[in-house]
Image: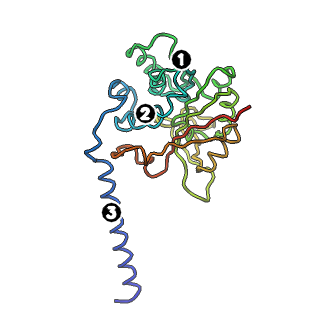
Amino acid sequence: MPKVGILRLVASRARNHYRENFLRLERKLFHDKSDQGGGFFDAYPRFYETSIIGARNRLNKRYRALIEPNEDIIRDKSVLDIASHDGRWSFAAYKAGSRYVLGIEARHHLVQHSQDNMRMYGVPEGKVEFVLGDVFEKLDQLEPGRFDTVFCLGFFYHTMHHMLLLNKIGHLRPSHIILDTCIDLDPDSFVAVQLERVAHESAGAVPDSGDPERILVGSPTRSALELMLASAGYPSIKYFDWHRAGIRRWDNLIEYHRGLRVSLVAVRKPA
């Protein structure tokens, strides 16, 4: 067999071996029988139904990453929940002992679901509230010093206005930002840009261009994200380590496993 043919055969076998090992690993990640335990949202199963984004394992594992380690900056604090969806994280903040929570959401039906969920689970009136509208406009209507902690969970990569968002948050002077976002892993990139259809609940909701169906969004690299946070006055960052969290089953969490999505807390620079 010619040398070129041998090299191609070796390369093909190597690719197949890698693919088989990767698929074997993926099957284990998705079906590890040792990780069948419940989680926070199992006690509040409406949140599995009031949004199309409600996979059980995903919600419960994200609770462990976003709420449990951060109870000290949620308990007795006033919390702002940006892009609050069906109220899942606003409710989680309330159950973690927050003094007050305000959620901002751009989709009317999700605000309605949020309010229904709070009533269903007996949240006292005035403890958790929701406003309908564009987050950038609503942030301008809030007074500085009102909120101690800001949630930005799953919204940051659904906009191209990253610094505008962070500067508006910084103007409110919260001491902490809990942020969860997809990132781009290309070392030669700064922000990966794409068009996203707004019809889906998991997408950006308010087009800011002449296209009524799509919005321009961007996923920053980790280094770009850190530069943006520092520029907005939040230079101290602590990442949640998904790989040391005891997770054995990664259903609907594969982007965290691959490092394509990160969870962090950013702390405001002292005045």
Residue at the image position 60 percent from the left and 32 percent from the top = 176
Q: CA distance from mark 1 to mark 3?
A: 49 Å
Which residue matches tag 3?
A: 21
Q: Earlier in the sequence, mark 1 or mark 3?
A: 3
Q: Nearer the viewer, residue 252 or 248?
A: 248
Q: Is residue 133 above or below residue 14?
A: above
Which residue matches tag 2?
A: 63
Name the kind of residue labelled 3 in the image. Asn
**Which disc number belongs to residue 99?**
1
Are circles 1 and 3 on residues that touch, CB within 8 Å?
no
Q: Position of residue 27 (x, y in %)?
A: 29, 53
Q: Nearer the viewer, residue 237 or 254?
A: 237
Q: Earlier in the sequence, mark 3 or mark 2?
A: 3
Residue at the image position 55 percent from the left and 45 percent from the top = 195
Classify mark 2: helix, strand or loop.
helix
Name the kind of residue labelled 2 in the image. Tyr
Label 3: how many Cα within 10 Å (few below 14, some 14–19, many 20+): few
Name the kind of residue labelled 1 in the image. Arg
Are circles 3 and 2 on residues that touch, CB within 8 Å?
no
User: Would residue 23 appear left or right of 270 to someone viewing this image?
Assistant: left
